[in-house]
Image (cartoon, rainbow, N blue to C red):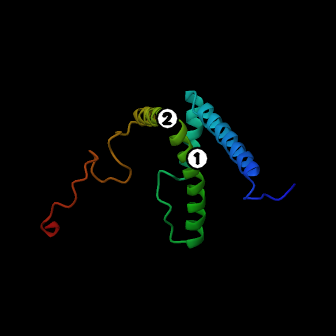
Amino acid sequence: MTDFNASDRKQIRAAEKAAAVAEAQRAEVIIESMATPQRRRYVWEKLAAAGIFQTTFSTDPLQMAFNEGQRNAGLVLLNDVIQYCPEQFIEAMREANGRRDSDSARSGSPTSERPGSEDAGGDDQGRTDAASG
């Protein structure tokens, strides 16, 4: 392999062409990956597993660094999905919400309640005593 010469216009054009081809192939892969409900679910599960929808905080700095690395990989995928097929990402969100609502209905838990909420209605009313001001 020869060294790249940044002053050679022919080499620059060849590198630009190769980059454009690689970008088109990347777009094609992402678009195909979001083409069906099953594929969108797979991508959504990978994004969720990477932790992009949650905090990466940990009191253990090594665990937190690991979590951030996982999240960064997920964010790279998310960026590609949003760049090449934003409508399918919105559809994937709707499908994930539908699955979550369906799972909640089967388990009998209300969908409006956030995890860890003490209020059965899921309302975030805060403190109601005199100390709350």
Q: CA distance from mark 1 to mark 2?
A: 14 Å
Q: Quadrant of the N terminus?
A: bottom right
Secondary structure category for the residue under label 1: helix
- The crowding category of the residue bearing disc 1, from other C-alpha atoms within 10 Å (few below 14, some 14 to 19, many at least 20), is some
- The crowding category of the residue bearing disc 2, from other C-alpha atoms within 10 Å (few below 14, some 14 to 19, many at least 20), is many
Secondary structure category for the residue under label 2: helix
In this figure, which residue is indicated by the disc labeled 2? 92
Residue closer to the observer: 48 or 20: 20
Q: In the picture provided, is 35 more to the left or to the right than 21?
A: left
Query: At 74% from the left edge and 46% from the top edge, which residue is drawn?
Result: 14
Q: In the picture provided, is 58 more to the left or to the right than 10?
A: left
Q: Which mark is residue 90?
A: none
Q: Position of residue 49 (x, y in %)?
A: 57, 49
In this figure, which residue is indicated by the disc labeled 1? 77
Q: Position of residue 38 (x, y in %)?
A: 59, 30
Q: Is residue 48 above or below residue 60?
A: above
Q: Position of residue 81 (x, y in %)?
A: 54, 41
Q: Amino acid at mark 2?
A: Ala
Q: Quadrant of the C terminus?
A: bottom left
Query: At 15% from the left edge and 64% from the top edge, which residue is drawn?
Result: 129
Q: Is residue 99 above or below residue 20?
A: above
Residue closer to the observer: 96 or 120: 96
Q: Is residue 54 above or below residue 81?
A: below
Q: Earlier in the sequence, mark 1 or mark 2?
A: 1
Q: Amino acid at mark 1?
A: Leu
Q: Position of residue 96 (x, y in %)?
A: 47, 36
Q: Quadrant of residue 128?
A: bottom left
Query: At 58% from the left edge and 67% from the top edge, which residue is drawn?
Result: 65
